[in-house]
Amino acid sequence: MNKLVAWEKLHNAAKWLSTPSGDFEAFMAANYWGESGLVFLDLGCATGGSTIFLAEKGFKVIAVDASESACTRLADNLTNKDLVQVVNADVTKLALKSRSIDCVIAANIFDCLEIEEAQALFKASSGWLKVGGRLFARILIEEPAPFARPELKLKYYSMDEVIKAMGGNFYGSIIPVTRYVGSNIPVHNWVIDVVNGK
């Protein structure tokens, strides 16, 4: 099964959370408390937990996902439509204005890419971000068996692979974080909070 078809099927069937993860909320509180007038890019936005949160705080958001049904569901659920541009596109083929973004959000999108695509997306993100802009990412270390979907062929990253994919354009922190979902099932991720240095 084609990966995009698999994601479309999943988005049609799944009910995704409409709220952001706790690690994303912590990132926002630490870095953007009291800020205004910023532009965020939400890569792999799905049905928009992070996008909706950002728009409710008054930030402008470009929300991108390859799934048409995910984008439609996000657009239908927006209350701040004037702040959000929903883009149905492959993140690896995205063209944006250089130095136009204050913060890139990439929650588990790199897991869906091959390592070469991840490297290219980190490099593109560095170009879209203003110098000093931030990137928040969550990347799977491993996926628990109950959530495994062979048709999606997710990529799991070691610390060395994360650093290699980032390519030296960013500096900041990469920490392992375990969160519990469903019936207390642990999901292990790298949580990345980095600054664009180029």
Image: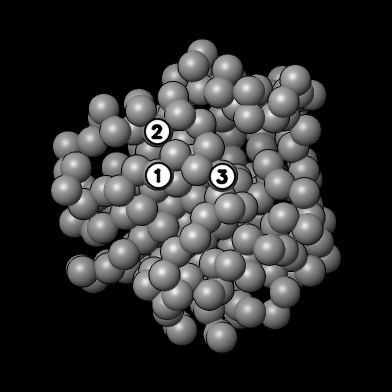
- Of callouts 1 and 2, the N-terminal one: 2
Mark toward the viewer: 3 or 2: 3
Q: Residue at x 51, y 13 (%)?
A: 13
Which disc number belongs to residue 87?
Answer: 1
Contact, mark 1 vs mark 2 (Cβ under 8 Å): yes
Q: Position of residue 35 (x, y in %)?
A: 23, 70
Secondary structure beneath label 1: strand
Which kind of residue does numbered mark 2 sit on? Cys
Secondary structure beneath label 3: loop
- From the image, which quarter does the N terminus lie in? top right
For the residue pair 93 and 110, the one nearer the viewer reads as: 93
Q: Quadrant of residue 27?
A: bottom left
Which kind of residue does numbered mark 1 sit on? Val
Q: Is residue 57 left or right of residue 183?
A: left
Q: Is residue 183 left or right of residue 176?
A: left
Q: Position of residue 53 (x, y in %)?
A: 30, 46
Q: CA distance from mark 1 to mark 3?
A: 9 Å
Residue 45 visible here: no
Q: Residue at x 83, y 65 (%)?
A: 160
Q: Which residue is mark 3?
A: 90
Q: Is residue 48 above or below residue 197?
A: above
Q: Quadrant of residue 57?
A: bottom left
Secondary structure beneath label 2: helix
Which kind of residue does numbered mark 3 sit on? Asp
Q: Which residue is mark 2?
A: 71
Contact, mark 3 vs mark 2 (Cβ under 8 Å): no
Q: Residue furthest top?
A: 13
Q: Position of residue 79 (x, y in %)?
A: 17, 37
Q: Is residue 100 above or below residue 46?
A: below
Residue 44 visible here: yes
